[in-house]
Amino acid sequence: MPEPASETRVRAVIPATALQALIDALAQTHTVIGPVLRDGAIIYDRIARTEDLPAGWTDRQEAGRYNVERRDDAALFGYNVGPHSWKKFLHPPRETLFTARREGSELTITPDESAGQERYAFLGVRACEVAAIARQDRIFMGGAYRDAGYAARRRNAFIVAVNCTEAGATCFCASMGTGPHVQAGFDLALTELLDDNRHDFLVQAGSPAGAALLATLPGRVTEGADLAASAAGKARADAQMGRKLETKGLKEALQANPTHSRWDEVATRCLSCANCTMVCPTCFCTTVTDVSDLSGTEFTRERQWDSCFTLDFSYVHGGAVRQSGAARYRQWLTHKIASWIDQFGESGCVGCGRCITWCPVGIDLTVEAAIIAAGDAK
Protein backbone atom coordinates (compact mmCIF):
# COMPACT_ATOMS: atom_id res chain seq x y z
CA MET A 1 0.00 0.00 0.00
CA PRO A 2 1.55 3.32 -1.04
CA GLU A 3 2.97 5.53 1.69
CA PRO A 4 3.87 9.14 0.93
CA ALA A 5 7.41 9.48 -0.36
CA SER A 6 9.73 11.84 1.46
CA GLU A 7 10.09 13.57 -1.91
CA THR A 8 7.01 12.86 -3.97
CA ARG A 9 8.31 14.90 -6.92
CA VAL A 10 11.00 12.32 -7.74
CA ARG A 11 10.79 11.99 -11.52
CA ALA A 12 12.63 10.43 -14.41
CA VAL A 13 12.06 9.66 -18.06
CA ILE A 14 12.47 6.08 -19.23
CA PRO A 15 12.23 4.70 -22.77
CA ALA A 16 9.26 2.47 -23.57
CA THR A 17 11.67 -0.44 -23.89
CA ALA A 18 12.47 -0.08 -20.16
CA LEU A 19 8.92 -1.00 -19.23
CA GLN A 20 9.97 -4.65 -19.38
CA ALA A 21 12.55 -3.97 -16.67
CA LEU A 22 9.76 -2.52 -14.52
CA ILE A 23 7.57 -5.59 -15.04
CA ASP A 24 10.51 -7.92 -14.28
CA ALA A 25 11.33 -6.05 -11.07
CA LEU A 26 7.72 -6.16 -9.89
CA ALA A 27 7.43 -9.86 -10.74
CA GLN A 28 10.18 -10.71 -8.27
CA THR A 29 7.87 -9.96 -5.34
CA HIS A 30 4.36 -9.59 -6.78
CA THR A 31 1.91 -11.07 -9.24
CA VAL A 32 1.80 -8.42 -11.94
CA ILE A 33 -1.68 -7.54 -13.24
CA GLY A 34 -2.14 -5.29 -16.23
CA PRO A 35 -4.30 -4.58 -19.28
CA VAL A 36 -4.65 -7.27 -21.95
CA LEU A 37 -6.80 -7.52 -25.06
CA ARG A 38 -9.10 -10.52 -24.81
CA ASP A 39 -12.49 -11.46 -26.26
CA GLY A 40 -13.01 -8.06 -27.82
CA ALA A 41 -12.31 -6.00 -24.70
CA ILE A 42 -9.36 -4.62 -22.75
CA ILE A 43 -9.45 -6.34 -19.37
CA TYR A 44 -7.08 -6.84 -16.42
CA ASP A 45 -5.16 -10.08 -16.04
CA ARG A 46 -1.69 -11.43 -15.31
CA ILE A 47 1.09 -10.16 -17.52
CA ALA A 48 4.77 -11.06 -17.85
CA ARG A 49 5.92 -9.15 -20.94
CA THR A 50 5.28 -5.81 -22.56
CA GLU A 51 3.96 -7.85 -25.50
CA ASP A 52 1.00 -8.76 -23.29
CA LEU A 53 -0.12 -5.11 -23.24
CA PRO A 54 -2.69 -3.85 -25.81
CA ALA A 55 -0.11 -2.00 -27.94
CA GLY A 56 -1.71 -0.05 -30.74
CA TRP A 57 -5.30 -0.65 -29.55
CA THR A 58 -7.91 1.75 -28.25
CA ASP A 59 -11.55 1.57 -27.21
CA ARG A 60 -14.61 3.44 -28.39
CA GLN A 61 -17.40 3.86 -25.86
CA GLU A 62 -20.87 5.32 -25.73
CA ALA A 63 -23.99 4.63 -23.73
CA GLY A 64 -24.61 0.91 -24.09
CA ARG A 65 -21.76 0.46 -26.58
CA TYR A 66 -18.14 -0.67 -26.43
CA ASN A 67 -15.70 -1.81 -29.08
CA VAL A 68 -11.96 -1.91 -29.62
CA GLU A 69 -10.14 -0.77 -32.72
CA ARG A 70 -6.64 -0.22 -34.01
CA ARG A 71 -4.84 3.04 -33.36
CA ASP A 72 -2.48 4.66 -35.83
CA ASP A 73 0.38 4.45 -33.35
CA ALA A 74 1.95 1.94 -30.93
CA ALA A 75 0.66 3.40 -27.65
CA LEU A 76 0.71 0.83 -24.86
CA PHE A 77 -1.96 2.60 -22.78
CA GLY A 78 -3.96 4.29 -25.52
CA TYR A 79 -7.38 3.25 -24.21
CA ASN A 80 -9.64 4.34 -21.34
CA VAL A 81 -11.25 1.76 -19.04
CA GLY A 82 -12.92 -1.58 -19.77
CA PRO A 83 -15.41 -3.81 -17.97
CA HIS A 84 -12.94 -4.84 -15.26
CA SER A 85 -11.82 -2.78 -12.30
CA TRP A 86 -9.10 -3.47 -9.74
CA LYS A 87 -11.89 -4.17 -7.25
CA LYS A 88 -12.00 -7.77 -8.47
CA PHE A 89 -8.52 -8.35 -7.01
CA LEU A 90 -8.76 -6.37 -3.77
CA HIS A 91 -12.43 -7.22 -3.06
CA PRO A 92 -12.91 -10.55 -4.88
CA PRO A 93 -16.29 -11.49 -6.36
CA ARG A 94 -16.29 -14.62 -4.21
CA GLU A 95 -14.33 -15.21 -1.02
CA THR A 96 -14.35 -17.96 1.60
CA LEU A 97 -14.81 -16.54 5.10
CA PHE A 98 -14.55 -19.69 7.21
CA THR A 99 -15.18 -23.42 7.31
CA ALA A 100 -17.12 -25.13 10.12
CA ARG A 101 -16.93 -28.83 10.93
CA ARG A 102 -19.05 -30.83 13.37
CA GLU A 103 -17.62 -33.85 15.13
CA GLY A 104 -20.07 -35.29 17.61
CA SER A 105 -21.14 -32.45 19.86
CA GLU A 106 -18.11 -30.32 18.96
CA LEU A 107 -18.19 -27.58 16.33
CA THR A 108 -14.86 -26.28 15.02
CA ILE A 109 -14.73 -23.03 13.05
CA THR A 110 -11.61 -22.40 10.99
CA PRO A 111 -11.10 -18.98 9.35
CA ASP A 112 -9.79 -19.00 5.81
CA GLU A 113 -6.12 -18.19 6.39
CA SER A 114 -5.39 -17.87 2.68
CA ALA A 115 -7.37 -14.61 2.46
CA GLY A 116 -5.09 -11.66 1.85
CA GLN A 117 -1.92 -13.61 1.10
CA GLU A 118 -1.87 -12.39 -2.49
CA ARG A 119 0.73 -9.78 -3.43
CA TYR A 120 -0.45 -7.87 -6.46
CA ALA A 121 1.30 -5.23 -8.52
CA PHE A 122 -1.23 -3.30 -10.61
CA LEU A 123 0.14 -1.79 -13.83
CA GLY A 124 -2.04 0.72 -15.64
CA VAL A 125 -4.29 2.11 -12.89
CA ARG A 126 -6.10 5.21 -14.12
CA ALA A 127 -6.59 8.27 -11.92
CA CYS A 128 -10.31 7.56 -11.48
CA GLU A 129 -9.41 4.00 -10.46
CA VAL A 130 -6.86 5.17 -7.89
CA ALA A 131 -9.65 7.32 -6.45
CA ALA A 132 -11.98 4.29 -6.44
CA ILE A 133 -9.43 2.24 -4.51
CA ALA A 134 -9.16 5.05 -1.96
CA ARG A 135 -12.94 4.97 -1.53
CA GLN A 136 -12.92 1.24 -0.92
CA ASP A 137 -10.07 1.74 1.57
CA ARG A 138 -12.43 3.92 3.63
CA ILE A 139 -15.20 1.34 3.39
CA PHE A 140 -13.15 -1.71 4.36
CA MET A 141 -10.43 -0.18 6.56
CA GLY A 142 -11.66 3.23 7.70
CA GLY A 143 -14.14 2.29 10.41
CA ALA A 144 -14.22 0.31 13.61
CA TYR A 145 -14.67 -2.98 11.71
CA ARG A 146 -11.81 -3.64 9.34
CA ASP A 147 -11.99 -6.29 6.64
CA ALA A 148 -8.87 -8.34 7.37
CA GLY A 149 -8.64 -9.93 3.92
CA TYR A 150 -9.02 -6.62 2.08
CA ALA A 151 -6.58 -4.88 4.40
CA ALA A 152 -3.93 -7.55 3.81
CA ARG A 153 -4.33 -7.46 0.04
CA ARG A 154 -4.25 -3.68 0.06
CA ARG A 155 -1.20 -3.56 2.29
CA ASN A 156 0.70 -5.85 -0.09
CA ALA A 157 -0.36 -4.07 -3.29
CA PHE A 158 1.99 -2.00 -5.45
CA ILE A 159 0.23 0.53 -7.68
CA VAL A 160 1.64 1.76 -10.98
CA ALA A 161 -0.76 4.43 -12.17
CA VAL A 162 -1.04 5.68 -15.75
CA ASN A 163 -2.10 9.24 -16.39
CA CYS A 164 -4.71 9.74 -19.09
CA THR A 165 -3.72 11.82 -22.12
CA GLU A 166 -6.99 11.03 -23.91
CA ALA A 167 -10.55 10.76 -22.58
CA GLY A 168 -13.49 8.66 -23.72
CA ALA A 169 -17.03 9.60 -24.63
CA THR A 170 -18.41 8.36 -21.29
CA CYS A 171 -15.64 9.77 -19.07
CA PHE A 172 -16.43 12.53 -16.56
CA CYS A 173 -13.62 12.22 -13.99
CA ALA A 174 -12.88 15.94 -14.36
CA SER A 175 -16.37 16.69 -13.00
CA MET A 176 -15.75 14.43 -9.99
CA GLY A 177 -12.26 15.82 -9.28
CA THR A 178 -10.63 12.41 -9.72
CA GLY A 179 -8.67 12.84 -12.96
CA PRO A 180 -7.43 12.76 -15.61
CA HIS A 181 -4.03 12.80 -13.85
CA VAL A 182 -3.39 11.06 -10.56
CA GLN A 183 -2.46 13.15 -7.52
CA ALA A 184 -1.84 10.63 -4.72
CA GLY A 185 -2.32 7.00 -3.72
CA PHE A 186 0.23 5.45 -6.08
CA ASP A 187 3.75 4.03 -5.90
CA LEU A 188 4.70 5.03 -9.43
CA ALA A 189 2.79 7.10 -11.99
CA LEU A 190 3.49 6.88 -15.71
CA THR A 191 2.65 9.38 -18.43
CA GLU A 192 3.09 7.97 -21.92
CA LEU A 193 4.91 10.44 -24.19
CA LEU A 194 4.52 9.34 -27.79
CA ASP A 195 5.04 11.15 -31.09
CA ASP A 196 6.89 10.65 -34.34
CA ASN A 197 10.25 11.12 -32.64
CA ARG A 198 9.89 9.41 -29.28
CA HIS A 199 8.16 6.77 -27.19
CA ASP A 200 8.98 7.41 -23.57
CA PHE A 201 7.37 7.43 -20.15
CA LEU A 202 7.57 10.24 -17.64
CA VAL A 203 7.68 8.42 -14.31
CA GLN A 204 6.89 9.98 -10.93
CA ALA A 205 7.41 8.24 -7.60
CA GLY A 206 4.63 8.51 -5.06
CA SER A 207 6.06 6.37 -2.25
CA PRO A 208 9.47 5.32 -0.87
CA ALA A 209 9.00 1.90 -2.48
CA GLY A 210 8.25 3.56 -5.79
CA ALA A 211 11.27 5.83 -5.55
CA ALA A 212 13.52 2.86 -4.77
CA LEU A 213 12.24 0.95 -7.79
CA LEU A 214 12.50 3.97 -10.07
CA ALA A 215 16.18 4.32 -9.14
CA THR A 216 16.88 0.87 -10.62
CA LEU A 217 15.34 1.60 -14.02
CA PRO A 218 17.34 2.89 -16.99
CA GLY A 219 16.40 6.48 -17.67
CA ARG A 220 17.41 10.11 -17.65
CA VAL A 221 16.67 13.31 -15.80
CA THR A 222 13.37 14.97 -16.58
CA GLU A 223 13.54 18.06 -18.78
CA GLY A 224 11.16 20.94 -19.29
CA ALA A 225 9.97 19.55 -22.61
CA ASP A 226 8.92 16.32 -20.87
CA LEU A 227 6.84 18.18 -18.31
CA ALA A 228 5.32 20.33 -21.05
CA ALA A 229 4.33 17.23 -23.02
CA SER A 230 2.74 15.70 -19.91
CA ALA A 231 0.80 18.90 -19.20
CA ALA A 232 -0.37 19.03 -22.82
CA GLY A 233 -1.63 15.45 -22.51
CA LYS A 234 -3.62 16.35 -19.40
CA ALA A 235 -5.13 19.38 -21.10
CA ARG A 236 -6.08 17.24 -24.09
CA ALA A 237 -7.80 14.69 -21.86
CA ASP A 238 -9.65 17.44 -19.98
CA ALA A 239 -10.93 18.86 -23.27
CA GLN A 240 -12.05 15.44 -24.54
CA MET A 241 -14.28 14.54 -21.58
CA GLY A 242 -17.43 13.14 -23.16
CA ARG A 243 -19.69 13.69 -20.15
CA LYS A 244 -20.10 16.33 -17.44
CA LEU A 245 -21.88 16.27 -14.11
CA GLU A 246 -22.61 19.40 -12.11
CA THR A 247 -22.01 18.35 -8.52
CA LYS A 248 -22.77 21.62 -6.76
CA GLY A 249 -26.01 21.11 -4.86
CA LEU A 250 -26.51 17.68 -6.42
CA LYS A 251 -26.60 15.77 -3.13
CA GLU A 252 -29.28 17.97 -1.63
CA ALA A 253 -31.34 18.01 -4.83
CA LEU A 254 -31.40 14.22 -5.17
CA GLN A 255 -32.32 13.68 -1.55
CA ALA A 256 -35.12 16.24 -1.87
CA ASN A 257 -36.72 14.48 -4.85
CA PRO A 258 -37.67 10.91 -3.86
CA THR A 259 -40.99 11.14 -5.74
CA HIS A 260 -39.71 12.74 -8.97
CA SER A 261 -41.49 11.24 -12.00
CA ARG A 262 -38.13 10.46 -13.61
CA TRP A 263 -37.63 7.52 -11.25
CA ASP A 264 -40.64 5.79 -12.80
CA GLU A 265 -39.60 6.78 -16.32
CA VAL A 266 -36.11 5.33 -16.01
CA ALA A 267 -37.59 2.17 -14.48
CA THR A 268 -39.40 1.49 -17.75
CA ARG A 269 -35.97 1.15 -19.39
CA CYS A 270 -33.91 -0.33 -16.54
CA LEU A 271 -33.60 -4.13 -16.69
CA SER A 272 -32.42 -4.42 -13.05
CA CYS A 273 -29.61 -6.54 -14.51
CA ALA A 274 -27.01 -5.13 -12.06
CA ASN A 275 -24.42 -4.54 -14.80
CA CYS A 276 -23.79 -1.04 -13.46
CA THR A 277 -22.95 -2.28 -9.97
CA MET A 278 -20.79 -5.15 -11.23
CA VAL A 279 -18.57 -2.89 -13.37
CA CYS A 280 -18.54 -0.01 -10.86
CA PRO A 281 -15.13 0.23 -9.15
CA THR A 282 -16.62 1.41 -5.84
CA CYS A 283 -19.83 -0.61 -5.34
CA PHE A 284 -19.25 -2.98 -2.44
CA CYS A 285 -22.55 -4.74 -1.62
CA THR A 286 -22.27 -8.43 -0.82
CA THR A 287 -24.28 -11.36 0.46
CA VAL A 288 -23.20 -14.54 2.24
CA THR A 289 -24.00 -18.14 1.40
CA ASP A 290 -23.42 -21.36 3.32
CA VAL A 291 -22.40 -24.43 1.33
CA SER A 292 -22.73 -27.76 3.14
CA ASP A 293 -21.53 -31.24 2.28
CA LEU A 294 -24.06 -34.04 1.85
CA SER A 295 -23.41 -35.46 5.31
CA GLY A 296 -24.13 -32.17 7.04
CA THR A 297 -20.88 -32.34 9.01
CA GLU A 298 -19.00 -29.54 7.23
CA PHE A 299 -19.98 -26.28 5.62
CA THR A 300 -18.23 -23.27 4.16
CA ARG A 301 -19.42 -19.70 4.46
CA GLU A 302 -18.70 -17.63 1.39
CA ARG A 303 -19.11 -13.95 0.65
CA GLN A 304 -19.99 -12.91 -2.89
CA TRP A 305 -20.86 -9.73 -4.71
CA ASP A 306 -24.51 -8.74 -4.71
CA SER A 307 -26.40 -5.73 -5.98
CA CYS A 308 -29.06 -3.35 -4.75
CA PHE A 309 -30.78 -3.97 -8.10
CA THR A 310 -31.73 -7.54 -7.17
CA LEU A 311 -35.13 -8.00 -5.54
CA ASP A 312 -33.79 -10.24 -2.79
CA PHE A 313 -31.09 -7.80 -1.71
CA SER A 314 -33.55 -5.78 0.40
CA TYR A 315 -35.52 -8.82 1.55
CA VAL A 316 -36.51 -8.93 5.19
CA HIS A 317 -39.19 -11.02 6.89
CA GLY A 318 -42.36 -10.46 4.93
CA GLY A 319 -40.83 -9.36 1.63
CA ALA A 320 -38.43 -7.02 -0.10
CA VAL A 321 -38.23 -3.39 1.01
CA ARG A 322 -37.66 -2.13 -2.54
CA GLN A 323 -40.26 -3.93 -4.66
CA SER A 324 -40.13 -1.81 -7.81
CA GLY A 325 -37.43 -1.12 -10.33
CA ALA A 326 -37.92 2.59 -9.71
CA ALA A 327 -37.19 2.14 -6.00
CA ARG A 328 -34.07 0.11 -6.73
CA TYR A 329 -32.70 2.58 -9.26
CA ARG A 330 -33.44 5.46 -6.89
CA GLN A 331 -31.58 3.62 -4.10
CA TRP A 332 -28.53 3.06 -6.29
CA LEU A 333 -28.25 6.56 -7.77
CA THR A 334 -29.11 8.43 -4.58
CA HIS A 335 -26.69 6.37 -2.52
CA LYS A 336 -23.90 6.59 -5.09
CA ILE A 337 -23.80 10.36 -5.41
CA ALA A 338 -25.70 11.63 -2.36
CA SER A 339 -26.01 9.56 0.81
CA TRP A 340 -22.53 8.08 0.22
CA ILE A 341 -21.32 11.55 1.15
CA ASP A 342 -23.21 11.30 4.44
CA GLN A 343 -21.54 7.94 5.13
CA PHE A 344 -18.00 8.49 3.94
CA GLY A 345 -17.53 12.21 3.36
CA GLU A 346 -17.26 12.05 -0.44
CA SER A 347 -19.16 10.86 -3.48
CA GLY A 348 -19.18 7.18 -4.37
CA CYS A 349 -18.84 8.05 -8.06
CA VAL A 350 -15.39 8.64 -9.58
CA GLY A 351 -16.55 9.48 -13.10
CA CYS A 352 -15.12 6.44 -14.88
CA GLY A 353 -18.26 6.09 -17.04
CA ARG A 354 -18.45 2.29 -16.82
CA CYS A 355 -22.08 2.28 -15.68
CA ILE A 356 -23.01 4.25 -18.82
CA THR A 357 -21.02 2.13 -21.26
CA TRP A 358 -22.03 -1.26 -19.89
CA CYS A 359 -25.73 -0.55 -19.36
CA PRO A 360 -27.47 -2.73 -21.98
CA VAL A 361 -30.09 -0.04 -22.63
CA GLY A 362 -27.72 2.94 -22.35
CA ILE A 363 -29.05 4.61 -19.20
CA ASP A 364 -26.77 7.57 -18.52
CA LEU A 365 -26.09 8.49 -14.88
CA THR A 366 -25.14 12.06 -15.79
CA VAL A 367 -28.41 12.62 -17.67
CA GLU A 368 -30.65 11.05 -15.03
CA ALA A 369 -28.95 12.90 -12.16
CA ALA A 370 -29.24 16.24 -13.93
CA ILE A 371 -32.96 15.77 -14.72
CA ILE A 372 -33.86 14.68 -11.20
CA ALA A 373 -31.73 17.43 -9.64
CA ALA A 374 -33.72 19.99 -11.63
CA GLY A 375 -36.63 18.94 -9.42
CA ASP A 376 -39.58 20.18 -11.46
CA ALA A 377 -41.52 17.07 -12.43
CA LYS A 378 -43.42 15.28 -9.65
Image (cartoon, helix red, strand yellow):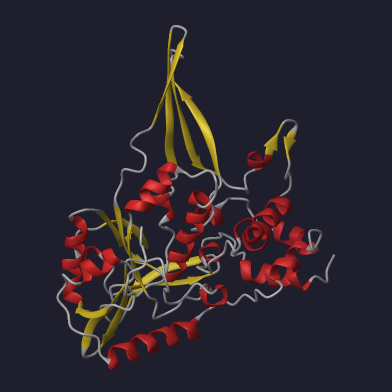
Residue at image location 27% in from the left, 67% down from the top: 210
Q: Which quadrant is the N terminus positioned in?
A: bottom left
Q: Return the x and y of residue 109 as percentages of the image width and height.
A: 43, 23
Residue at image location 56% in from the left, 65% down from the top: 356
The answer to which of 40 and 283 lies nearer the viewer is: 283
Res 372 → quadrant: bottom right
Res 70 → quadrant: bottom left
88 versus 350 height, above or below = above
In this rendering, the count of numbered labels is 0
Q: Return the x and y of residue 322 as percentages of the image width and height.
A: 72, 45
Q: Return the x and y of residue 126 as percentages of the image width and height.
A: 40, 69
Left or right: residue 66 compared with residue 27? right
Q: Which quadrant is the C terminus positioned in?
A: bottom right
The answer to which of 263 and 154 lies nearer the viewer is: 154
- Residue 364 appears in view: no
Res 159 → quadrant: bottom left
Residue at image location 44% in from the left, 64% down from the top: 129
The answer to which of 138 and 248 lies nearer the viewer is: 138
- Residue 103 appears in view: yes
Find the residue positioned furthest to the top: 104
Left or right: residue 241 compared with residue 252? left
Q: Return the x and y of residue 315 as percentages of the image width and height.
A: 68, 37
Residue at image location 37% in from the left, 46% down from the top: 152
Find the residue positioned furthest to the front: 6
